[in-house]
Image: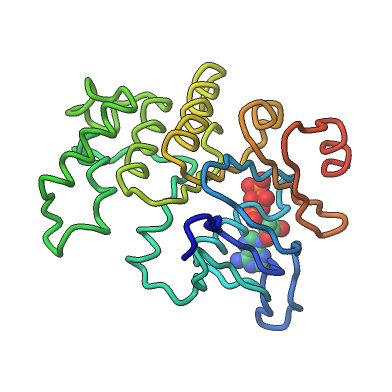
Amino acid sequence: MDNNEEVLMLVFKNLHIGFSKIKHKKESLLFSSDELLFNPGEFVAVIGPNGSGKTTLFNTILGEQEPLSGAISIDRQNWKDLSRMDKAKHLSFVPSKFGGVEHLTVYNLVAMGRAPYTNMLNKLTEKDQAVVKKVLNQLGLSDFTNKNTVTLSDGERQIAMIGKALAQEAKIMILDEPTAFLDYNNRRKVLQLLKDIAVKNNQLIFISSHDLELCFEYCSRVIAIDAESQMLLDFKTPFNKEEIVKKVFK
Ligand SMILES: Nc1ncnc2c1ncn2[C@@H]1O[C@H](COP(=O)(O)OP(=O)(O)OP(=O)(O)O)[C@@H](O)[C@H]1O
């Protein structure tokens, strides 16, 4: 590839998102989108009213469900053609709520992010251990290494989950409502952390959120689901907040 050519990370090609015919029900389209390109280093918020399709969009990107039509490609490869392991090397996912698991330490949680690179026995190589250590340092989690994940606060646990995703070294990170269960300070802390990661690691990060003001403040791009026109709308900074809210939350 020509070195000057921009690498296109993720492309939505005329996507139609929704649910296909189930039993006697008709196919239900939630929204469609024109061609959209996402590049490394972007911090993208997916916003929209309850039930507009944010989780469905993430499930489609994650390959958990098929688009009604259109396609998603990553680095010019059709997402559908990649193996599960290859997908895990490209894309990490952080669910909204993780309550912790008894006896699972922060170190072991972060180390689980190395799963796509380890063998069947999940034995960490020196390189894997170095990545886990680096992530723990980067996120200020070194003092929590041996702490049980059930005993962490919601904020600490969310950061540990981001650590697991970082250890996965995927170019794209998707977080479903990462601030939903956090207090005001931790919301800001997590969003600042994600913003820094996007820039420093040159990663493409997607979050879904109902914290519109914070999305406008921290994100570099907002993808909004307009349920009325059934279209995905694309906004870049500087955001015209009033216009976006008016269009999407009628
Ligand atoms: N398996 C399914 N089959 C058919 N429709 C579904 C299915 N799962 C979800 N839906 C519907 O699809 C729509 C979009 O749901 P989705 O969870 O993606 O919305 P959301 O924007 O993430 O909502 P929220 O902000 O409340 O989390 C909703 O109307 C929901 O009822």
Give above or below for 151 relative to 104.
above
Q: Is residue 82 left or right of residue 22?
A: left
Quadrant housing residue 152: top left
Residue depicted at x 34% and y 48%: 169
Q: Is residue 189 left or right of residue 159?
A: right
Identify the image's colour scheme: rainbow, by chain, secondary structure or one colour. Answer: rainbow
> Along the line of sight, which residue is nearer the eye, 102 or 81?
81
Total numbered labels? 0
Q: Is residue 37 left or right of residue 235?
A: left
Residue depicted at x 52% and y 57%: 7
Does residue 9 show up? no
> Along the line of sight, which residue is nearer the eye, 236 or 104?
236
Give above or below for 121 relative to 188.
below
Residue depicted at x 69% and y 80%: 21
Quadrant housing residue 230: bottom right
Residue depicted at x 64% and y 36%: 220
Q: Quadrant of the C terminus?
A: top right
> Along the line of sight, which residue is nearer the eye, 203 or 6?
6
Does residue 236 show up? yes
Give above or below for 78 relative to 212.
below
The image position of residue 99, as x and y in percent, is 37, 37
In the displayed orientation, state which residue is furthest to the bottom: 24
Quadrant housing residue 187: top right
The image position of residue 124, as x and y in percent, is 13, 50
Q: Is residue 137 left or right of residue 30?
A: left
Give above or below for 115 relative to 142.
below
The image position of residue 63, as x and y in percent, is 50, 67
The image position of residue 214, as x and y in percent, is 65, 27
Q: Quadrant of ligand 1?
A: bottom right
